[in-house]
Amino acid sequence: MENIKQAAFQRKCEDRCTRETKELVAYIDGCAYKCPKCDAVVLLDETEYSTLACIYSDIEEIEKKCEDCNNLCTFERIGVSDYFEHPIDIEYRVGEEKEYRGVRVMMDDGPAIYIDTQAEEVQLSWDGVNVTRKISLYAVDAINDYFQWRYDCIQ
Ligand SMILES: [Zn+2]
């Protein structure tokens, strides 16, 4: 019984980490849109996005019925800065000359979720279970560009 419970919990952690990684990548890929009325966020999947992308060259806005507030809304595209709007903690990695090298951002504390650009992964830690998901170099670069800018702002 304990083993079954443990395996189920492990799977729950894996799923949560996968979901977080997909969400992060969607924001970076420009597939995340926000309802202006209720702030609900929708993530378009790749097929949906590429179909739309064939019709419009650059989709900043999407007319769509919002499932949260039930209005027909003009959803606006959101990006990396929106994903990192409310981090719990930001730990910068800097060199001796104070130059930016990377960042580890805590996005949630129950479970603990970190985005780490030097490890190039999303990390989840929950009741002794640790799960990681690799993120692409492209995504790492996008996150580093944003946090380099943010770090420069506080210098
Ligand atoms: Zn809405």
Image (cartoon, rainbow, N blue to C red):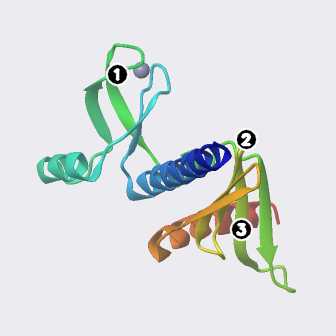
Q: Residue furthest left?
A: 55
Helix, strand, or loop for circle 1? loop
Q: Nearer the viewer, mark 3 or mark 2?
A: 2
Q: Quadrant of the N terminus?
A: top right
Crowd tier of the residue under label 1, counting other residues whose Cα lies within 10 Å: few below 14, some 14–19, many 20 or above? many
Residue depicted at 67% across the width and 69% down the height: 148
Q: Quadrant of the C terminus?
A: bottom right
Q: Which residue is mark 3?
A: 103
Q: Earlier in the sequence, mark 1 or mark 3?
A: 1
Q: Nearer the viewer, residue 108 or 125?
A: 125
Q: Which residue is mark 1?
A: 66
Q: Earlier in the sequence, mark 1 or mark 2?
A: 1
Does residue 77 sit above or below 50 in this rendering?
above
**Horizontal side, residue 81 vs residue 62: left or right:** right
Measured in 3D between alpha carbons, the distance from the residue under mark 3 to the one under mark 2, in whole angstroms, is: 20 Å
Residue depicted at 65% across the width and 75% down the height: 119
Amino acid marked by disc 3: Val
Q: Which residue is mark 2?
A: 110
Q: Quadrant of residue 14?
A: bottom right
Measured in 3D between alpha carbons, the distance from the residue under mark 1 to the one under mark 2, in whole angstroms, is: 28 Å
Would you say the beta carbon of the disc 1 residue lies within 8 angstroms of ligand 1?
yes
Amino acid marked by disc 2: Gly
